[in-house]
Image (cartoon, rainbow, N blue to C red):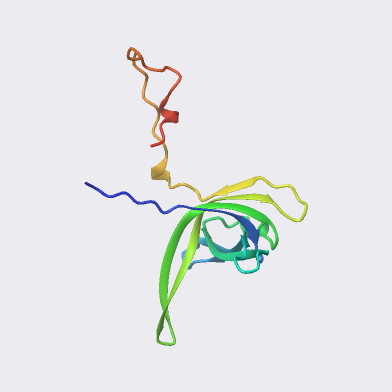
Amino acid sequence: MASRSVNKVILLGHLGKDAETKFTPSGVARTTFSVATNRRLKDQQTGEWRDETDWHNIVAWRMENVANYLTKGKQVYIEGRLQTRNYEKEGQKVYITEVVAEDLILVSGRGEGGGEEYSRPAPAAASRPAPRPQSAPAQGFDETINDDDVPF
């Protein structure tokens, strides 16, 4: 029996600095930025509420035009996956965990509107095949359900 696994990250937070886009030698855009998420905790000793902030490093591939809109303080919604990579620095192995953004929505920021959505372009081979013609529904089958309602 094959095992199942899921690597899914959803973040809603504010940009800590302006996004930066660089290009690989083959011309692929790599946009990086950091996102802050906050949570409110009650201190068990004092009973006082305090805010804690977590910082997340985000990498967006092939979204070269989005960096102009990702400026410090703006709120973004990100869906993606965790990826860990490593490299050597001064003889020590360094590990970095990043969120690889697959979908990005500018929610708002600094009193501005939002709602712009950016997605990594899908590979040409991943295009959806044309739907098959429907045969007569089986008895007791709900005709309002179609292939678009199936989650897989």
Any part of residue 21 in sight: no
Q: Quadrant of the C terminus?
A: top left
**Rendering quarter of residue 145:** top left
Q: How many marks?
A: 0
Give x and y (percent) for residue 57: 54, 65
Give x and y (percent) for residue 3: 27, 50
The residue lying furthest to the right in this view is 111
Give x and y (percent) for residue 74: 69, 57
**Rendering quarter of residue 45:** bottom right
Any part of residue 131 in sight: yes
Give x and y (percent) for residue 26: 46, 64
As drawn, is 10 to the left or to the right of 83? right
As drawn, is 103 to the left or to the right of 150? right
The residue lying furthest to the left in this view is 1
108 and 5: which is toward the camera: 5
6 and 47: which is toward the camera: 47
**Figure check: 146 above or below 10:** above
Residue placed at 67% from the left, 58% from the top? 68
Residue placed at 42% from the left, 44% from the top? 124
**Figure check: 90 above or below 70:** below
**Rendering quarter of residue 150:** top left
The residue lying furthest to the bottom in this view is 90
